[in-house]
Image (tube, grey):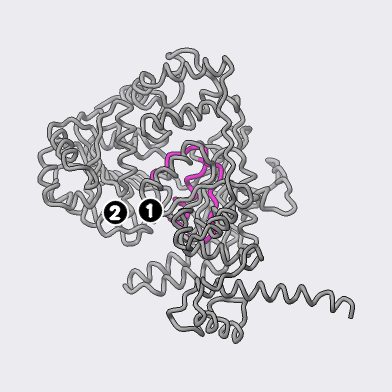
């Protein structure tokens, strides 16, 4: 058995860390001892190191089951740069590449081998794995195996065959968000034997939870105020649908805020490129659906803002938990509307399977109670996951008096609480320097921008994500205490021996260039606002479909934008957009039920008439109505 000193030496040599995070060393020793293990550790808690480090000590192959190909590839690349041989095997690889990986795996060349659950389900994969010198299996995102989990994936159920096919190999399950019921299901489904269980606290003390019910017409204006408030660090905005991604990005762009879109229907190359632009600080704000976030390794996220109710507490906890991974204070703001709960209820009612429908209703009731409750939000989250708290209020959520400056009107500072103010039972304070504000407090901001640019360029040259070259936390530490030698760089967190040998001289050279006057390039690109771009493309004779393709937007988003421009009088409605027959039918329906809501109009019309058709006609009629009222005003004023 390796001693604590041995493990810390490996941690320093490969990862560049001097100490383990809570529970990490115990979990590593459990796996080194050959025990089945179940680990529940919040996002950013360091789960992956728990199964990666034992692979080095055991000098055998750890097979990691993970649901995302891109995430597996990034982890394998990162390990390779640390000097730890790792590989991914998936169907997207060319046949000769798959053959090479399989051959090298049988020879024991890899310490970590990443597979998808679908790949593991193939009989030929099982036969091949039985010829590999295996240490143990690590199941990432293990909550996906449970029907009670918020991201249940049927293919994960097939992992129960691991115990049958590899009876002598330990199995380790890792997840960031599992209730007590889901944890029991994980143990049962994977047939873990006398498993060692490690459950970290679900209390993220540096996160401030704020939940606000708001009107549709104020929500996006609040979002603009929020993004301008978080001038340093990154922001993630979660929206419920693909259409809302495009609409939100365009709304922000019209107000001078650049944001990157991310959703599941984008081509994978575009998705990856957009993610990397955000990760490398090319653009601070990302607007995405639930598709964004799994495995994101970004430390300096100062805010996660949800523009609708998530479908479960687990989903909210996982997404909000992408804020503040550097340990500094960060805001998790849920701006929801009354219609959100109606939408969740509607989708729950449409589920055919009765058991799954009941689970969806339970998730709905819990997330709605969370949003409407005035009880401490940290406490409610902890209790949901089965953790008993010894405190009743946190002073880090709006239920306990915390206010976000940009949300309160008028903005006012939270009064300081003295130790003797009579309010008892607070949770332990965040494990950060309490004097250090949410914005970066140390280091030269010009040096930070220069190093970010160096990191971006280096990552592009090597075709790897920016964080693989250097973590945010490492970059910030260099800005605080710039090293003058490789020995000093080795003392920076995150710089192990291999990373120092790869990038050390380049970083020292970049620091010398900065001292000699070099600065980050200030390339200001004049960007046409979305509405202006749509108007230009329309004037050039492009169809709605062509504009959607040229702008990388959903057709519905483009038509919605054109309808808004018609209503505002920026462009004229064109008769060629709608056939005369459809136009007259829609106008008749509008005359009958009014112009306020689209659904009553749709209910009056034949099925072949779409919401897009209705939007355009309603915009025309609203514009005509506004012009008519404007022309009447002078008459009424004079009598």
> Circle 1: is it few (<14), some (14-19), or many (20+) Cα within 10 Å?
many
On the picture, is 547 further left or further right than 132? right
The residue segment tinted magenta is 295-324
Q: Secondary structure at mark 2?
A: helix
Point out the residue furthest to the right here.
638
Q: At x 37% / y 34%, what residue is drawn?
A: 464
Residue at mark 1: 178
Q: At x 59% / y 42%, what residue is drawn?
A: 526
Q: Quadrant of residue 471?
A: top left
Residue 21 versus residue 4 in the image, above or below: below
Quick check: can you spot residue 377?
A: no
The answer to which of 531 and 13 lies nearer the viewer is: 531
Q: At x 61% / y 33%, what residue is drawn?
A: 436
The answer to which of 537 and 163 lies nearer the viewer is: 537
Residue 203's x, y, as percent?
49, 46
Residue at mark 2: 186
Residue 590 versus residue 262 in the image, above or below: below
Q: Is residue 163 magenta?
A: no
Quadrant where the N terminus lies? top left
The answer to which of 193 and 572 lies nearer the viewer is: 572
Q: Quadrant of residue 563?
A: bottom right
Report, in whole angstroms, how far the alpha carbon at label 1 lies from the one at label 2: 9 Å
First in sequence: mark 1 or mark 2? 1
């Amino acid at each position: 058995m390796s001693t604590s000193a041995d493990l810390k030496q490996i941690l320093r040599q490969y990862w560049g860390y001097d100490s383990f995070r809570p529970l990490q060393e115990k979990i590593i020793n459990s796996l080194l001892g050959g025990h089945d293990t179940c680990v529940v550790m919040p996002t950013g808690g360091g789960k992956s190191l728990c199964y990666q480090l034992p692979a080095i000590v055991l000098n055998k192959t750890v097979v990691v089951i993970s649901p995302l190909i891109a995430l597996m590839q990034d982890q394998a690349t990162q390990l390779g740069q640390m000097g730890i041989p790792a590989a991914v095997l998936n169907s997207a690889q060319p046949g000769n590449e798959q053959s090479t990986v399989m051959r090298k795996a049988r020879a024991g060349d890899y310490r970590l081998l990443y597979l998808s659950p679908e790949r593991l389900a193939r009989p030929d994969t099982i036969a091949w794995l039985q010829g590999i010198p295996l240490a143990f299996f690590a199941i990432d995102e293990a909550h996906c195996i449970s029907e009670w989990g918020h991201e249940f994936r049927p293919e994960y159920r097939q992992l129960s065959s691991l115990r049958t096919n590899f009876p002598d190999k330990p199995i380790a399950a890792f997840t960031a968000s599992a209730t007590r019921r889901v944890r029991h299901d994980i143990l049962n489904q994977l047939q873990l034997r006398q498993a060692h269980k490690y459950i970290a606290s679900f209390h993220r003390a540096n996160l401030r939870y704020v939940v606000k019910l708001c009107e549709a017409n104020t929500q996006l204006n609040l979002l603009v105020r929020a993004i301008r408030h978080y001038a340093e660090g990154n922001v993630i905005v979660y929206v419920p649908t693909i259409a809302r991604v495009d609409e939100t990005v365009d709304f922000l762009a019209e107000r001078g805020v650049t944001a990157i879109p991310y959703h599941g229907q984008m081509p994978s190359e575009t998705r990856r490129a957009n993610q990397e632009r955000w990760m490398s600080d090319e653009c601070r704000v990302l607007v995405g659906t639930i598709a964004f976030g799994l495995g994101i390794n970004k430390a300096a996220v100062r805010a996660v803002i949800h523009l609708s109710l998530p479908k479960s507490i687990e989903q909210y906890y996982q997404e909000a938990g992408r804020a503040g991974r550097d340990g500094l204070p960060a805001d998790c703001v849920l701006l929801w509307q009354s219609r959100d709960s109606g939408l969740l209820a509607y989708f729950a009612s449409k589920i055919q399977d009765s058991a799954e429908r009941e689970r969806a209703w339970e998730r709905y009731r819990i997330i709605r109670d969370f949003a409407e409750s005035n009880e401490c939000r940290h406490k409610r989250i902890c209790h949901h996951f089965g953790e008993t708290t010894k405190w009743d209020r946190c002073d880090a959520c709006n239920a306990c008096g915390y206010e976000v400056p940009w949300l309160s009107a008028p903005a006012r500072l939270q009064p300081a609480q003295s130790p003797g103010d009579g309010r008892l039972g607070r949770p332990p304070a965040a494990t950060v320097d309490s004097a250090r504000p949410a914005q970066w407090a140390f280091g030269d901001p010009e040096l930070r921008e220069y190093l970010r640019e160096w990191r971006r360029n280096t990552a592009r040259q090597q075709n790897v994500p920016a964080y693989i070259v250097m973590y945010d936390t490492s970059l910030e530490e260099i800005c605080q205490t710039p090293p003058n030698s490789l020995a000093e760089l080795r003392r920076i967190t995150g710089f192990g021996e291999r990373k120092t040998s790869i990038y050390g001289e380049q970083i020292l050279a970049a620091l010398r260039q900065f001292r000699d006057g070099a600065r980050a390039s200030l390339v200001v690109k004049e960007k046409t606002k979305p509405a202006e771009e749509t108007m230009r493309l329309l004037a050039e004779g492009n169809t709605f479909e062509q504009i959607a393709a040229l702008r990388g937007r959903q057709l519905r988003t483009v038509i919605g934008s054109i309808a808004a421009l018609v209503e505002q009088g920026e462009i004229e409605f064109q008769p060629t957009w709608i056939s005369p027959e459809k136009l007259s039918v829609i106008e008749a329906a509008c005359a009958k039920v009014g112009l306020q809501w689209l659904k009553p109009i749709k209910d009056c019309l034949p099925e072949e008439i779409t919401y897009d058709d209705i939007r355009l006609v309603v915009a025309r009629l609203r514009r005509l109505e506004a012009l008519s009222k404007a022309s009447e005003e002078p008459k009424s004023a004079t009598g």
